[in-house]
Image (cartoon, rainbow, N blue to C red):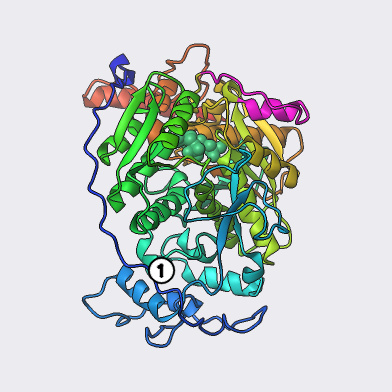
């Protein structure tokens, strides 16, 4: 393969002009009466119907409201306006609410302790610890598990604003008080839960109940969309409330920046992204450029970019979009709820998540735990966090028996989006793992690239981070910790197309100190019938095919 094919160049991007600030819109009237059934004292059991609803009589938050009806709105009204009209008729909060409290939040905390409205711009507690979004569980518990399951199930695959989104279909558990008018959604979520039949059978000692949750098959190609729709929606609300926000900013290894830029572009809000120069893929670099963000390519690593964005956002009215901001995790946790939903509310035994800044592992824990607490399921899965050996501070912490945490300087890894040595959500991750009888595993560069390639050879198009998680699966299976029939879900966090460079390098056997056992380079053949026939005959004679060489 031509060397030039592999030589991607990353030059600093020229900053682009910000989009104009959106004009203010009216806020909802909060003093409307609560509709039935939310007025009475539950827990409720409701009969769920998915038949057509009429706009004049339906509670917009009832399962029936998500059902399509040909004439449900006037022809000149769009779906957002329709949702607003409905919620002006019915108070949309039903008493559900959420607020920030210091992490870890305790169910016993009440208004007397430190807490903040979600309309405040605050990222840490007075003592400097992370914050958590705490929901009014007493209000949510008024409805039983069967109600929530039926409500969420009734919204899947609809176009009713904003429930067509896998995140906003769980709105009551995410940002219950936001006006649908302020939601910035690209109908994210509802991602494929893929039965990895052949990978499980052939590469993981005959596993037959192995699944891959494709969170990367998404609008911007990673799971970050799930969190960013929530964060940018809340920013949109804050701007319309008149808060002095001039834009939203993040440090990124390439996926957070892509998601932030897309959602900000959709809302007309300026985005500022700090990227470590020459450490992200070309596909990731071009995403914020294309979406009109201000791109700062900085001569440091991700941890350096993170320090800078934190300093900058404490000086300038730029809202911080990294997962240090707990709003993000409210969206990301819906992937866990979605997994349960996709299994008809049966709980898998294991869920394996690649970890970097470590917000996502906590988000998964939170989603599962909320379903348990509210009676949708009776247990939560065991969580595994998988790290690249070249960027493994959590793994080292776990191996030390959770002794004092020490950040590391992360080395270069093909799993470049998790090249993070000082994860901001370390405390959240430890909490999630300890509460779920969790495990931490690591993957060398060769292991993660081989695992990614094997996944591809069974029909996926995985990213290197998914390769990290698949390696953890293989190791835990080989150790007998994960059983052959255990229902296991591997979280695929990004689209493989973002990491084409690393796949090209692997299949070209162009990586030093790596055997690239499963490389499948193209064969250069003269463009005449005889030459083509010679090659094919030799292939067929030797029964060599990319697939056969593997097994
Ligand atoms: C593709 C991909 N996978 C995994 C991760 C890890 O997620 P987290 O930082 O929440 O641990 C990230 C970002 O860090 C990512 O971009
Ligand atoms: N992989 C991330 C790193 C930052 O993570 P965040 O979840 O804290 O924003 C990225 O793509 O930037």
Q: Nearer the viewer, residue 421 or 294?
A: 294
Q: Nearer the viewer, residue 271 or 166?
A: 271
Image x and y of residue 128, in percent? 61, 38
Q: Secondary structure at mark 1?
A: loop
Image x and y of residue 215, in percent? 48, 47
Q: Residues within 10 Å of mark 1 (few under 14, many from 20)?
A: some
Image x and y of residue 509, in percent? 44, 17
Task: Give the extent of the magenta segment.
Answer: 392-411
Give the residue at x 43% y 19%.
300
Query: How many numbered discs sit on the rendered protein?
Result: 1
Query: Picture quarter containing residue 395?
Result: top right
- Left or right placement of residue 425 versus residue 165 in this view: right
Q: Residue furthest top?
A: 512
Q: Is residue 314 visible?
A: yes
Q: Nearer the viewer, residue 495 or 325?
A: 325
Give the residue at x 47% y 41%.
460
- Left or right placement of residue 60 versus residue 172 in this view: left
Q: Is residue 270 above or below residue 24?
A: above
Q: Is residue 416 visible?
A: no
Q: Residue furthest bottom?
A: 57
The C terminus - image quarter = top right
Considering the whole magenta stretch, tell me its main secondary structure. loop
Image x and y of residue 161, in percent? 38, 68
Q: Nearer the viewer, residue 275 or 239?
A: 239
Q: Is residue 309 above or below residue 177?
A: above
Residue 410 sits inside the magenta stretch: yes
- Judging by the rendered image, the residue that carries numbered circle 1 is 158
Residue 399 sits inside the magenta stretch: yes
């Amino acid at each position: 393969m031509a060397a030039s094919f592999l030589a991607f160049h990353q030059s600093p991007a020229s900053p682009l002009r910000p989009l104009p600030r959106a004009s203010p819109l009216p806020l909802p009237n909060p003093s409307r009466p609560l509709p039935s059934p939310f007025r009475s004292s539950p827990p409720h059991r409701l009969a769920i119907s998915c038949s057509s609803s009429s706009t004049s009589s339906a509670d917009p938050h009832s399962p029936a409201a998500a059902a399509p009806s040909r004439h449900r709105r006037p022809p000149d009204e769009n779906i957002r306006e329709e949702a607003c009209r409905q919620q002006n008729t019915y108070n949309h909060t039903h008493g559900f609410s959420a607020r920030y409290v210091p992490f870890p939040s305790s169910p016993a905390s009440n208004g007397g302790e430190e807490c903040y409205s979600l309309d405040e711009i605050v990222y840490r507690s007075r003592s400097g610890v992370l914050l958590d979004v705490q929901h009014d569980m007493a209000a949510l518990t008024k409805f039983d598990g069967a109600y929530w399951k039926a409500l969420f199930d009734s919204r899947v695959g609809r176009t009713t604003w904003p429930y067509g989104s896998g995140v906003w279909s769980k709105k009551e558990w995410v940002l219950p008080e936001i006006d649908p008018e302020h939601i910035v959604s690209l109908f994210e979520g509802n991602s494929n839960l893929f039965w990895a039949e052949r990978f499980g059978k052939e590469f993981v000692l005959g596993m037959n109940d192995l699944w891959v949750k494709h969170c990367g098959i998404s609008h911007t190609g990673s799971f970050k969309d799930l969190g960013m729709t929530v964060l940018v929606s809340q920013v949109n609300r804050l701007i319309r409330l008149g808060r002095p926000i001039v834009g939203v900013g993040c440090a990124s290894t390439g996926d957070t920046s892509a998601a932030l830029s897309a959602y900000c572009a959709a809302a007309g809000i300026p985005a500022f992204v700090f990227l470590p120069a020459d450490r992200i893929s070309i596909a990731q670099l071009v995403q914020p450029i294309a979406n009109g963000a201000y791109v700062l390519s900085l001569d440091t690593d991700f941890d350096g970019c993170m320090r800078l964005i934190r300093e900058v956002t404490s000086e300038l009215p730029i809202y911080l979009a990294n997962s240090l901001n707990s709003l993000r995790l409210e969206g990301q946790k819906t992937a866990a709820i979605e997994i349960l939903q996709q299994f008809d509310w049966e709980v898998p035994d294991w869920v394996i998540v690649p970890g970097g800044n470590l917000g996502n592992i906590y988000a998964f824990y939170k989603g599962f735990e909320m379903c348990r607490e509210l009676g949708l399921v009776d247990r939560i899965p065991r969580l595994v966090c998988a790290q690249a050996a070249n960027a493994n501070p959590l793994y080292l912490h776990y191996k030390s028996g959770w002794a004092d945490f020490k950040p590391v300087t992360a080395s270069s890894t093909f799993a470049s989006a998790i090249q993070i040595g000082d994860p901001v959500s370390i405390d959240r991750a430890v909490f999630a793992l300890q509460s779920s009888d969790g495990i931490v595993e690591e993957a060398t560069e060769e292991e993660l690239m081989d695992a990614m390639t094997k996944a591809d050879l069974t029909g996926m198009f995985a990213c290197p981070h998914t390769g990290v998680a698949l390696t953890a699966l293989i190791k835990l299976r080989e150790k007998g910790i994960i059983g052959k029939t255990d229902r296991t879900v591997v979280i695929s966090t990004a689209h493989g197309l973002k990491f084409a460079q690393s796949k090209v390098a692997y299949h070209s056997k162009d990586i030093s100190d790596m055997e690239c056992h499963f490389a499948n380079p193209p064969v250069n053949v003269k463009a005449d019938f005889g030459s083509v026939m010679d090659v094919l005959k030799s292939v067929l004679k030797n029964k060599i095919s990319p697939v056969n060489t593997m097994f």
